[in-house]
Image (cartoon, grey):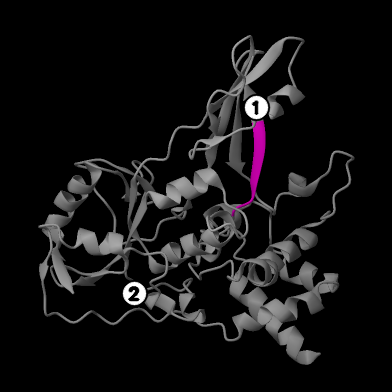
Amino acid sequence: MKFISSEKIPGFLEALSARSTVWAPRELTGSGGTVMFERWRPGDPIDLEHYSSLSAKDVVLPRTEKLFGYTYAFGGSPFSGGLGASGTAVAASDSDQAPATSGEQIVIKPAEPAPSTVLFGVRACDAKSIQVLDALFNNPGGEGYNDPQYSARREGLTVITLACTTCDDACFCSSFENGASEKAGSDLILYPVDGGFLAEGVTGKGGELLSEPFFEESELAPPPLAETAVIEGLERLQEILPGLFDDLDFWERVSERCVSCGFCTYGCPTCHCFNIHDEMQGDREGERLRSWDACMFALYTQETSGHNPRPTLAHRYRNRINHKFSYYPENQGEILCTGCGRCIRGCPAALDIRDVLRDALKAARKE
C-alpha cells in the first residue's frame, strides 16, 4: 500500500478540486456538531471523526434536480436538444402530442451536464450503498432501467472511502458479508494509521490517484477494522417476510413507536423514493423536477380518487421493511440496506430497525 500524511490531505483535496467538484464531510456552521457532506473548497475544514447525519447519496441522486426545462413557443423546431445529461434525442413526433395552443410547440431544454465529482471520506457502508442504487438506476448494458442523469453522474464519480477502525452502538454493517472491509462502490480506500492514512486502489480510477505526488510507498500494515453489531440471518428475510405480510398485528406492534417523520428514509443511503412535479415560471415556461419523497408519508401512495393502498402506519412500515429485505433483493439482487445505522441514530422515537428484523426472524421460527 501507499501512505499519505494527514498534513498532505488538504493539498490532495485542492489538487482534486482543480479538476473536479469535491464533496467531503464537514461540520455545518453553527450547527453544534452536525456533520454533512458538503461541497468542499480550498481552505474548508473537513471532519473525518464523526458520522454524517445524512448520507452522501445526494451526489448521485440529488434532493431536487431538474430533469429538463420547457417553453411554449410559436414556430421553430420543437424539442431543441434532448432529455437528460446524456443528451438522448427526443423523437420530434412526440412534440406533436401536446401543443399548448394551436400553432405552439413545446421546446425542451436539457438539464445541465453532470460534472466530474470526487466524493471524499465516505464510510464503506455509504460507498456500498452506491453500488446498491446502481442495481436500479444504472444498467447501461441494456438489461433493466438506465436513468440517464444518474448514470452520467455515476460515470463521472470517484469515491474515496475512509475505512472504519471504530464504530458506535448503531452500526451493524458486520451483519452483511464483508462488514467494515467492504470495498464495493469505492475507488480508493484510506486506512487510518499514525500520522496519516494507508491508501489502497480498488479500481483503475483509484489506482491512478495513487500516482500523485502526495502518496509514498509504505511497509505499514493496515489497521484492524471495526466489528459492529450483527443480526444473524438477514439473507433469509427475502423468503421469510412474504409469510408475515398478512400479519398486520405484527406490523402494528413493531411500528407502534413510529411518528412518520421520514428521517429514516431521508437519512438512509439507499432509500430512493421520489416525486416528479412541474414548476412554472410564468405561464409559458417551466421546469420538470425530481425531488426526494418518502414511502413513510401518508400521502405518498394516496391516489387521485382518495384511495390509499397503504392507509395506516403499519401498512407503510410493512412496505418499507419488505422493500428493503424482500422486494429489492428479489428484483435487483441487492439488500437495500448497508447497516450504516443512521435510521437508528436519528429516529426521534428510538425505533431500532434491528429489533424489527430480529422479531421477524423470531416470528418465522415460531411457525
Q: Viewer-proximal residue, 205 or 216?
A: 205
Q: Quadrant of residue 282?
A: top right
Asked if one can make out residue 297 in the rendered structure from this viewpoint, the answer is: yes
The percent coordinates of residue 294 (x first, y second) are 65, 50
Please tell me how crowded label 2 is: few (under 14), some (14-19), or many (20+) other residues with Cα within 10 Å. Answer: few
Viewer-nearest of discs 1 and 2: 1
Q: Viewer-proximal residue, 343 or 209?
A: 209
Disc ID at residue 166: 2
Task: Identify the residue shown where x is 61% and y is 60%.
Answer: 143
Residue of label 1: 92
Please state the extent of the stretch shown in magenta in the rendering: 272-277
Q: Viewer-proximal residue, 286 or 193?
A: 286
Query: Magenta stretch: residue 83 in it?
Result: no
Contact between marks 1 and 2 (CB within 8 A): the answer is: no
Is 125 drawn above or below residue 133 in the view shown? Answer: below
Asked whether, in this view, residue 344 is left or right of residue 305, the answer is left
